Image (spheres, rainbow, N blue to C red):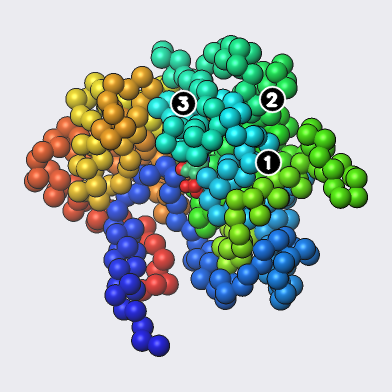
Amino acid sequence: MQRDQQIFDIIRQELERQRHGIELIASENFTSLQVMQAMGNVMTNKYAEGYPGRRYYGGCEVVDLSEQLAIDRAKEIFGVEYVNVQPHSGAQANASVFLAILQPGDKILGLDLSMGGHLTHGSAVNFSGKIYQPLFYGVNKETGRVEYDAMEKIALEEKPKVIICGASAYSRDWDYARIRAIADKIGAFVMADIAHPAGLIAKGLLNSPFDHCHFVTTTTHKTLRGPRGGMIMMGKDFENPFGLKTPKGETRLMSNLIDTAVFPGIQGGPLEHVIAAKAVSFFEILSDDYTTYAKQVITNAQAMATSFLEKGYQIVSGGTDNHLLLIDLRNKNISGKKAEQTLVKADITINKNMVPFDDKSPFVTSGIRVGVPAITTRGMQAEHMPLIVNWIDQLLMDADNESTITKVRGEVNEFMQQFSLYPEMGA
Ligand code: PLP
């Protein structure tokens, strides 16, 4: 068959873009070469509806081995009793938990999107806000931190079926015990979506949700540094509270309901090639190298926060506990949109982001979100953070000056040459 040179040339262009630029999108990372190699394998040819040892197709005995390995390694990483590695994405993981525990029209309570929450936590444009009845808590205007008192008040008044914690743009740790105490007053479930800080939780650098939250969902491609995908975990499996029984009359465990919600509820055949790559990334997470990486992520984020503060930038909540910062640009007279567009011209990628109590639309925004997982994988240390902040500041303070942009882009491209990326793929 003729080689599709056109698409391989485009992939090559993307490799060069990744090599030359400073990647500060908080949800992105660079997988190892072996994770990518595992992803591009013959398992993409295999249908495997069902779960290891109980499939709806023949010939699954080999993919059973890798899916079981992925499950066992994830259990070891997080010290949990139940893992489902099949969700194709974080959104699918969340949809599966909701399908398992909710009926259409049930109330759900999550962090408002404009305060850092995720689309799947009840946004009006997402299935979660259309099928279920969304309620929101927020962050305090002064402290930028989650308002647990307000969460409790809404929960007691509205009695949602599930309280969702976790976020896409929140730089502080969570008080899972407090959330569980609120949920217990109304008999609600707690679901923690740890898509962003999962890698830091894996190494005990942030509070663990597993003792307090009934369900924990995550993506596998952010701080966890695996292939794009999702995963669902439970610290402890438990008897479903809905009184559902198996055909033999036995009480069904929650793990059965979650498995059934993923397949056949939300998805068809699992992506076994991606699951193999998840297994490889979990192998890497179990290593000491990854522990060093996760600690460096926090060190770098804090160093970056200090540099931004020194230059008079306002960081929501005043700093960070994890891998990201949310910067309110209102005192710098530049919108998030303009900042994103300007920085990308100099090969620095970030994303515009709403800040709490934003007066601009989600298409413009008053803020930017800056994360360090990807640059930490490239090998950057705390000493490199002031350099990056300096470039960002020069660009944002002179956003319409093409010669500043050209100068900084040249410096960025030269700087990045010392941090090799996929050298095996050639120059
Ligand atoms: N949950 C949170 C908190 C996220 O930040 C994201 C993605 O950014 C998701 C879920 C969704 O993940 P995916 O893009 O894989 O569907």
Camera-nearest residue between 361 and 35: 361
The x, y position of residue 262, in whole percent, is: 64, 51
The x, y position of residue 223, in whole percent, is: 51, 46
Q: Quadrant of the C terminus?
A: bottom left
SS at badge 2: loop
The numbered mark, 2 or 3, whose residue comes first in the sequence reads 3
Three-letter residue code for mark 2: Ala
Callout count: 3
Side (left or right) of 177 relative to 230 = right
**Residue drawn at the location 32% of the way across and 49% of the way down:** 22
Side (left or right) of 264 relative to 320 = right
In the image, residue 130 sits, relative to residue 1, either above or below, namely above
Residue 100: mark in rendering? 1
Camera-nearest residue between 351 and 322: 351
**Residue drawn at the location 24% of the way across and 56% of the way down:** 414
Residue 112: mark in rendering? 3
